[in-house]
Amino acid sequence: AGFHRQLWDFMPIAAASTLASVYDGYLTTMWDLRWREELVRDFVGLWLSDKSYLFAARRAANGPESEFEGLPNINIDNFDQRIVEDTGIFASSSRALICGALAAAMRLVVFGPALLRTAPTA
């Protein structure tokens, strides 16, 4: 009887934990996608605004000349794909860092007082 009672007490906790985990995954995915979309829009706008693509193409075609002295000879292929991939990596890594720091702070706030109460006194 005691086991079944504890099992019924545990069921709402397990269900709430499962729902919170699924919703957390949804929110983090949506956050990553929206932040990535904003970053891509901003960086593509920067890339296209001052005709940076022409500068890079002319630099790759002409090789080192006086106006490009000291700059590396680069040829940029698929700049749009590189922007999308790099902003996606940045968005997800930044989100993981921020959420990890907040989760650690929350654990400290929740478990800190209990740890201090159970700590041995000198």
Image: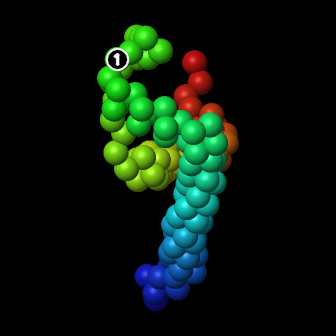
Residue type, label 1: Pro
User: Depth check: 108 or 53 in front?
Assistant: 53
User: Depth check: 93 or 1 in front?
Assistant: 93
Q: Quadrant of residue 72?
A: top left
The residue shown at (58%, 45%) is 48
Neighbours of disc 1 within 10 Å: few (<14), some (14-19), many (20+):
some
Q: Is residue 69 above or below residue 81?
A: above
Q: Quadrant of residue 60?
A: top left
Residue position marked by numbered label 1 in the rendering: 64
Q: Quadrant of residue 30?
A: bottom right
Q: Is residue 50 visible?
A: yes
SS at badge 1: loop
User: Which part of the image, by quadrant, shows the C terminus?
Assistant: top right
- Horizontal and vertical percent for residue 12? 57, 80
- Horizontal and vertical percent for residue 104? 56, 42
- Horizontal and vertical percent for residue 59? 40, 28
Q: Is residue 83 above or below residue 8?
A: above
User: Depth check: 62 or 56 in front?
Assistant: 62
Position of 112 compared to 57: left or right?
Answer: right
Q: Is residue 122 above or below residue 100?
A: above
Q: Is residue 98 visible?
A: no
- Horizontal and vertical percent for residue 9? 56, 80
